[in-house]
Amino acid sequence: MTLDQNSEVVDLAAMHPADAVEALNAMPPEEGGALLAAMDFRAAVNIFEQAGLENGAALIEAMRPERSVPLLAEIAADRRTEIFRKIDRAEASTLLTLLPPAPRGELEQLLSYEPETAGGIMTTEFFRARPDWTVGQSLAAIRATAAALETVYALYVVDSQGALIRAISLRDLVTADPGAPILSIGSDRRPFFVSPDAPREKVAQLVSKYDLSAVPVLDDSGKILGIVTVDDVIDAIIDNDTEDAQKQGGMQALDAPYMATSFVAMIKKRAGWLAALFLAEMLTASAMQHYEDELERAVVLTLFIPLIMSSGGNSGSQATSLIIRALALEEIKIGDWWRVAMRELPSGLALGAILGVIGAIRIALWQQLGIYNYGDHWTLIALTVSAALVGIVTFGSLAGSMLPFAIKRLGFDPASASAPFVATLVDVTGLVIYFTIASLILRGTLL
Amino acid sequence: MTLDQNSEVVDLAAMHPADAVEALNAMPPEEGGALLAAMDFRAAVNIFEQAGLENGAALIEAMRPERSVPLLAEIAADRRTEIFRKIDRAEASTLLTLLPPAPRGELEQLLSYEPETAGGIMTTEFFRARPDWTVGQSLAAIRATAAALETVYALYVVDSQGALIRAISLRDLVTADPGAPILSIGSDRRPFFVSPDAPREKVAQLVSKYDLSAVPVLDDSGKILGIVTVDDVIDAIIDNDTEDAQKQGGMQALDAPYMATSFVAMIKKRAGWLAALFLAEMLTASAMQHYEDELERAVVLTLFIPLIMSSGGNSGSQATSLIIRALALEEIKIGDWWRVAMRELPSGLALGAILGVIGAIRIALWQQLGIYNYGDHWTLIALTVSAALVGIVTFGSLAGSMLPFAIKRLGFDPASASAPFVATLVDVTGLVIYFTIASLILRGTLL
């Protein structure tokens, strides 16, 4: 299934569409466009139906309208919308006028939804059954229209106004008596549904929790606008988790795979957060200036600054990662912040105590083995370092766990509470905690 | 659909099984076990079929064998295996002897696979069709056996030895002529399959790339052992991403949701990495001791240590997050390390230059505005800080991007290259870079 990079002619039509997509992703859009324009139309449609196609917009732009317009008219409505969103603005409005009225109207409607909502990822091609049909009539109708549908695994019984009455799985349909009325099968619970502006994460949670093969998207009047299918949900989950992982790395999420992102786009996505964190971290320089006297009197204190600060950042990073993921999976809700704080407080104290003991042992060992001389007051220095570790790790765990709640409360994505963000937050406080404890313990001796 | 926490009696049987599972997850297993033992057997089975049930093992342990054994015999083979893996050892071997021979044999076979492989998450209940059947005969057979099957959306045509000949979707089946031979429909490509020891990530990639509803698991002879269905794949993707997110936070992955993890288990999962990073970070104290003379002569240098070190850590964290995710999605392969390095080197230089300029401006501003006096040689100090930032951010980007490759090469999970891990790695080197540049620039003036 791997592509022979050296072969002169890539026979896309002979490959599985998903493999043809991999080949197309790896070649310049002009070359891919030429191959697609020359190949069998049906095979080209199958390739464009694949969600994995990364440069669909560029490929469309590389083809002449005589080829690209029929292609766009033929592919699934959700894929068409996704590709259209990325087509150059001027080109897109030209193509829009060339499309036949039906797909054009559909497209304009779908483009009106935000891209990361249920409306933005739904398809309008699904199977509608009438409430007076039998099971057998429904199966016959599916047989006749299946080719144009993205999924036949979920059927939607709608009334004459288009309102959803019942959702039925193909499983229920094929196992039922063909003579039975359609409304006599399936569950009579109210069908699961989402509104068009529901975030795609919500759709993913619904599908994953209730093992659905598709979710209908209803407007306020109960009219069915479209459906989101399980394969789109998988793509949405993977996309979301990629964005979250990149945000947690302390940067803006990339819109494209790593290797497909240009140098300039990469710098833009990374420099913003890096510079913001840098500006915030400058507070550490100010804090250090504030403690300049202490630093000059006891240079020995500076030796432990990186160690102590990083421990606060690390404990904060652990707490943040845990809470972001638990919030994303809705294991905890925003109202649980107090319960979380009451768990993180003892966790932080315990973890800080463990590091504090290790730190004290290290100082005692180096002193006793003669590796380094911390001076006459080395026991007090060990005590200072240990106490500071307890304080800073506790603060890190608390701040790290509360930050995602605070960001979510402000209406932003909790995943923006990256490890670097937390570390920066904890660093300044960590210095203050360290020097405060030092002045309490060492006053009259070193300070 | 929310659970009234105050209601005296929770009527699990009246809820959707997925909601009943949420209610059960929130109550002590003894209470849940009592409710399950008293309720309708079929409804209890439906609840145990849900992948979301977190304490299935504890619930089984809380019931008497007269109830738990029929339940275990009835539920899907993959769920049974998952629950059994978590039952207390002694209890599990007792229950095993009480199970009827068929589910018992199945269970023993499934338990022999590693839990995070295709074999470990597959089910043995799927629809086998005979090669001489017609479409109509197959549909009739599905109708007769659907109740016992996890999915009917994929059918597997097997020969008399159990070897897989063809995979057919229910979609193909319902749209075909009922009189047609089964082998005349569907694709005659070789069906996609995995071996039982394939990691579950591989299965997820296959399902997501080719939009499959299930993947057959074949042994070396081509015999079909079981199938992994799309809903198990969604669970696997979510689980994997949770583990990755937690590892990237610098800790061991939890085995249970945040709130369901005990205090002691939480400390164990976090303390190990935290202590390991702390021990590694002690090298910073050693490095600082090494530069003690410089520190005493120019205390002003200490002011920028946290700022410079954190910038290296942040740029490393960005690069690491990008590469871990790209490796997980197979956007890049391990052989791409050199191409990645050749991208990260200029990225690091550019990002470092941006921070270097900001840093120099800050020092110049503070000096000129009289906020702080960096002394006569403030221009040299600004130069030192800027040059160190370029060096450290470049090193951070390179080290951060190469670490996941190195970890993968050693056979571990690249997601273990957490932000804290990278920061620790970069911190010691960052100090060395900083003091080396300082001694080059400031020798003869401050140093």
Image (cartoon, coloured by chain):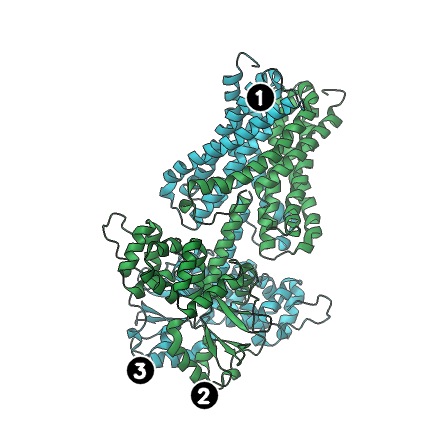
Chain colours: A cyan, B green
Parent chain of label 3? A
- Vertical arrangement, residue B314 with respect to residue A237, above or below: above
Parent chain of label 1? A
- The residue where tag 2 is placed is B179
Label 3–label 1 contact, CB within 8 A: no
Label 3–label 2 contact, CB within 8 A: no
> Where residue A38 appears, x then y in whole percent?
64, 74
Q: Amino acid at mark 1?
A: Gln
Query: Nearest the camera: A114 or A407?
Result: A407
> Where residue B124 appears, x then y in whole percent?
47, 69
Residue A187 seen in this snapshot:
yes
Q: Amino acid at mark 2?
A: Gly
Instruction: Residue A289: give its label.
Output: 1
Q: Amino acid at mark 3?
A: Gly
Query: Nearest the camera: B102 or A228?
Result: B102
- Vertical arrangement, residue A1 with respect to residue A133, above or below: above
Q: Nearer the viewer, mark 2 or mark 1?
A: 2
Q: Residue at x 40, y 37 (%)?
A: A341
- The residue carrying pointer 2 sits among few (fewer than 14), some (14 to 19) or many (20 or more) residues within 10 Å by Cα, namely few
> Where residue B38 appears, x then y in whole percent?
26, 59
Q: CA distance from mark 3 to mark 2?
A: 20 Å
Q: Quadrant of residue B350?
A: top right
Query: Nearest the camera: A446 or B387?
Result: A446
Residue B365 seen in this snapshot:
no
Q: Quadrant of residue B95?
A: bottom left
- The residue where tag 3 is placed is A179
**Element carrying mark 3:** loop
- The residue carrying pointer 1 sits among few (fewer than 14), some (14 to 19) or many (20 or more) residues within 10 Å by Cα, namely some
Parent chain of label 2? B
**Element carrying mark 2:** loop
Question: Is the C terminus of chain B in the top left, top right, bottom left or bottom right quadrant?
Answer: top right
